[in-house]
Amino acid sequence: MEIKTKAGLNNQSESKGSFADIHIIHYIGILGLGGDARNLCALAIAQSPWAKVSVLAGKVTSDALSLVLQAQGITVYQGIENAADLGSWLEGKKSLLCLFHRNGKSNDLETEILRLLQAYLVPCFEYNTFARVDRETDSLWAGHVHLSRSSLVQYAGRRAVDPLSLEGH
């Protein structure tokens, strides 16, 4: 199994795509066996035929998921544990779009990484499995992706607004 670590961050062996040279990065704190990681894998695999796709993780705890991703030509980078690690990886990359997989709870490390992505002008979309509201990071997202209409309705309820009035969701 080949997983890129901090030492290999500048290796350009991500999967090749053809859709306007878009490079989609999926960030997740822990690539393990949880629902967030399984959702990430399904989405990354669906995107890999038409875009360059990379998975960036703080830690990888599931070799099985890494092997599934790599079999589809998706490179998994582990050891992205802080903004400096991410900054090293971002250098020289173009046409990035980030899907940030998280549980929606406020987290200082995720906020730091999100601010760095914004500084690099990388549009970030929150992929929030549990429809939680994190008002601290509201201004940092280009939009939110919900797994279902039910998730969107739950999220709107937690914001105390009509689901149809949510912009960027």
Image (cartoon, rainbow, N blue to C red):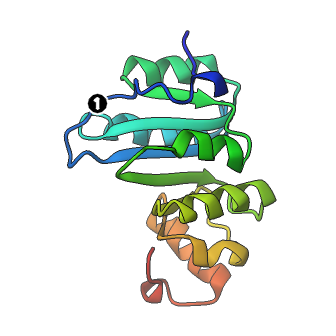
Query: Percent from the top left, x then y, of residue 115?
Result: 64, 64
What is the quadrant of residue 132 in the picture?
A: bottom right
Q: Residue placed at 44% from the left, 43% from the top?
A: 92
Q: Residue placed at 53% from the left, 75% from the top?
A: 153
Q: Is residue 23 left or right of residue 121?
A: left
**Is residue 132 shown to the viewer in this render?**
yes
- Disc 1 crowd, CA 10 A, few/some/many (<14, 14-19, 20+): some
Query: Percent from the top left, x then y, of residue 16?
Result: 28, 30
Q: Quadrant of the C terminus?
A: bottom left
**Is residue 39 shown to the viewer in this render?**
no
Towards the viewer: 87 or 126: 87
In the rendered image, the residue lying farthest to the front is 92
Q: Residue placed at 25% from the left, 34% from the top?
A: 49
In the rendered image, the residue lying farthest to the right is 108
Query: Percent from the top left, x then y, of residue 124?
Result: 50, 61
Q: Residue placed at 47% from the left, 70% from the top?
A: 143
What is the quadrant of residue 131 in the picture?
A: bottom right
Towards the viewer: 149 or 33: 33
Query: Percent from the top left, x then y, of residue 7?
Result: 64, 22
Task: Please tell me whether residue 123 is drawn above or below residue 9 in the rendered image.
Answer: below
Towards the viewer: 32 or 141: 141
Q: What element carries label 1?
A: loop
Towards the viewer: 82 or 144: 82
What is the quadrant of residue 9 in the picture?
A: top right
Residue flagged by tag 1: what amino acid is it?
A: Lys
Task: Please tell me whether residue 165 is drawn above or below residue 75 in the rendered image.
Answer: below
Q: Name the residue under label 1.
A: 16
Task: Please tell me whether residue 166 is drawn above or below residue 58 in the rendered image.
Answer: below
Q: Quadrant of the N terminus?
A: top right
